[in-house]
Amino acid sequence: MPPEKEEGTMEREPRQLCTFYLGGHFYGIDVVRVQEVIRYQDMTRVPLAPRDIRGLINLRGQIVTAVDMRRRLNLPERTGDDRPMNVVVRSDDGAASLLVDEIGDVMEVTTAAHDAVPQTVPQEARALLRGVFKLENRLLLELDIDRIVSCAANAA
Amino acid sequence: MSEIDEVLQEFIIESNENLDELDRSFVALEANPGDQQRVGAIFRAIHTIKGTSGFLGCTRLEALTHAGEEVLSRVRDGKLSLTPQITTDLLTMVDGVRAILRRLETTGVEGTEDFAEQIVRLKAIVSPAATAPTTHVAPAAPVAASKDDHPAEVHAVEAHEGSSVVDGTVRVDVALLDKLMNLVGELVLARNQIIQVGAIAGDATLIGASQRLNLITSELQEGVMKTRMRPIGSVWNKYPRIVRDLSVLCGKSVRLEMIGTETEVDRSLLDAIKDPLVHMLRNSVDHGIETPEARAAKGKAPTGVLALRAYHEGGKVNIELTDDGQGIDPERIRAKALERGVVSAERIGRMTEREITNLVFAPGFSTAETVSNISGRGVGMDVVKTNIERIGGTVELSSRHGHGTTLKVKIPLTLAIIPALVVHLGSERYAIPQVNLLELVRLEAAQARTAIADVHGTPVLRLRGDLLPLVHLRTVLDEPKPAVESEVVNVVILQADDRPFGLIVDGVSDTEEIVVKPLSRELKTVTTFAGATIMGDGRVALILDVVGVAQRANVLTESRERAVSLASKGTGLDQQNGAKDALLLLTRGANERLALPLDQVSRLEEFARGSVEQAGDNQVVQYRGEILPLISLDAVLGPCPTGAEDDGESPLQVVVFSQGGRSVGLVVGRILDIVQDSIVVKPTGKRHGVSGTAVIDGRVTQLLDVRTALGDLNDAA
């Protein structure tokens, strides 16, 4: 039997994370879950939707929900004219787009550099994080995509 | 491993198909016992299952089918004639086979149930003398024998049947068809876009090419839609059996006639109408058709006739269910409706007979004198209606008292692509499914002033002598008001659950064929939208769910909503999840935060401490010429763990609740604020007086369960 994809992600060594910036923090998500990264897209707002849902994007005929990651992680609002980038990720509920400040490189990380999220991080943010990678000059926070994408759905 | 799985899978699919056919054949055979061809077909089907199950090592299945085959072979050879009892036994065998197949499908093994009882009964038919002790031994021998004898024969049968069916058809995976349908949806969108571009550019060649594209796309759309079509008979197959069982149970004699079984319907719709139709059939057998004696007394033939008819008409699929039973007595409906409080006496007086008979679709309505296990629990026809309306269909009922009832269901051919009206609100566009649309009204400034009246702050529209509730789409969607309000009022008259209402929008553009795409799970909680679509210019537009809009605007405050709230009684706020709630925020002690729904509060008051008086065990104040009992939050929730913040001097903050003419005051720590927030309630343990917790304004807040709290208050008072 071939190894199952999902379980393999934790053991694969070294792993590759697609990285991006949000409010000065440095985040990463497993690169295999990323479908594509695209420029800012026009969005259709959804009235009455949760605050962190910014709207719907037409991605080549597919309707994708855009999640404002700053809002979901309780970070301060984006200021200035900089338009967010879309990181389109795959989930079992179709694709979702994460709105981030700026895109970084794809980085290789090893479990040796991995650490748990400190207990003192606020619960809302901690629930969405899988761990911290200690890079040479900064920390890379790995996000849990499944939690992020199904966040509101689970809570309801 | 996987190869055997595949063989097993094939076997299960094929056997299930055979079994569906069997149900029908058995019932047909009962009506016409001499039909040798049918007996042969049944025998072959059972024989095939038996043979293959032996081949696959499914011994229990083999033993059961073998017993059935024994009986059938005698019937085929004319040594035994089918009695209703034998048919019932054979049908139970078929059910047993189904049960085993289901288990095979889910677990991959047969399971432990051996259906010994059915086997014994079948054996008893073959040789009535057989006694219990021998039955335990008996299955083994024939099984062993059949293993040696039959495989070759089985293959012959399979090969023979196969060649006649496979001709000219291909089995296609449903997932592939769905994918094709999606792609065609995309193509329709791309076509809409190109037609728009062509119209703007005005280039003759481009227009010509886009017209051709238009034509081809439409044809392709039609073709692909056809591949998803299945004859409605594939669902109806099960009905003769259901009707037979039911009529036996009710002591009635019913014949089911099915006309138009080849009428084709989209797969997804077939699934959706399956259960509502069964419900309608049950109702007809249970309530509609009389017992043979009652029929004879009325001069009708003892056997009632149920006719199920399907046909295409005007781009829709019509399904009619007609019975020649007792029909609906308007008088009884009238009495029942009044008794159950479905409508007011004043309103029923103005209703036509047809409107009255259609009251059976009202929630909580049942005319059955006795509640049987078949129908009569009052959750019937309204559910049928809701389910059919959910897929964009309609149900109508007409009845002649004493002569029978006809139920007419109309459903669209497909759900994936629907015609819709596009409306504007500010810079956004919204699509409204055409099935909900009644008419469009445009009122110029002067007209608007006379046609739109104001009843206690609620706008209503006077339209040809009728009064329609008016709803601003802007208010429903919580959108900010525009800087300049237009003089002209555009009203879209919509119908939600038989209730017409007017929706005010900024502008109305065209009708368009749109491809419905579902919203992601996170947005499913927003009930005002049914989905989204991509417009010709590539932008996404939301599709309004007319019923959701009406509910949000309180147009549908009647019984349906009441039924829902009753069903979820006790869960408090849960049902309102995701919607914006007005909440009263308050504190208790040093830092405990509480919230309660604002709409349950009647007033907020402050009382000087000196005004509190003692009446028996209770603290009371004089309030508006009445005695208002007071109760502290601590009495409801238990002592405050963080200690009291009470300085013993400042006035008491009191939330006044009124219920049934009585008022009670809840003394709280501090009243903080009123917030409008979409809250997500997380249930807590069974804590008294608390319905759950939620994060409001970034703080964890407990939601006060006013109902239990009030209950306490009333007791205290």
Image (spheres, coloured by chain):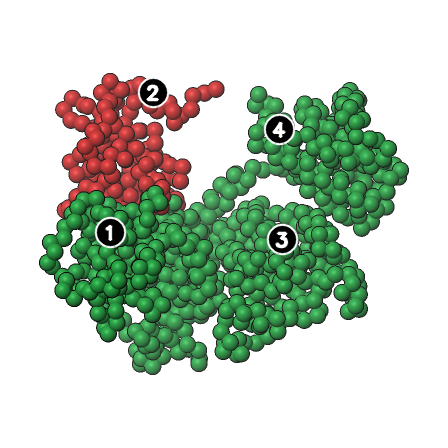
Chain colours: A red, B green
- Amino acid marked by disc 4: Gly
Could you tell me the amino acid type at mark 3? Answer: Asn
Residue that label 2 marks = A11
Judge by depth and name the residue closer to the eye, B255 or A93.
Answer: B255
Mark 2 residue type:
Glu
Between the C-alphas of marks 2 and 4, the distance is: 38 Å
Query: What chain does mark 4 sit on?
Result: B
User: Real-space Cα distance between discs 1 and 2?
Assistant: 53 Å
Q: Which of labels 3 and 1 is toward the front?
A: 1
Q: Nearer the viewer, mark 4 or mark 1?
A: 1
- The quarter in which the N terminus of chain B is drawn is top right
- For label 3, the SS is loop
In the image, is A88 to the left or to the right of B259? left
Q: Position of residue B87 (x, y in %)?
A: 78, 43
Q: Position of residue B279 (x, y in %)?
A: 61, 55
CB under 8 Å between callouts 2 and 4?
Answer: no
Mark sitting on residue B599: none
Residue flagged by tag 1: what amino acid is it?
Answer: Asp
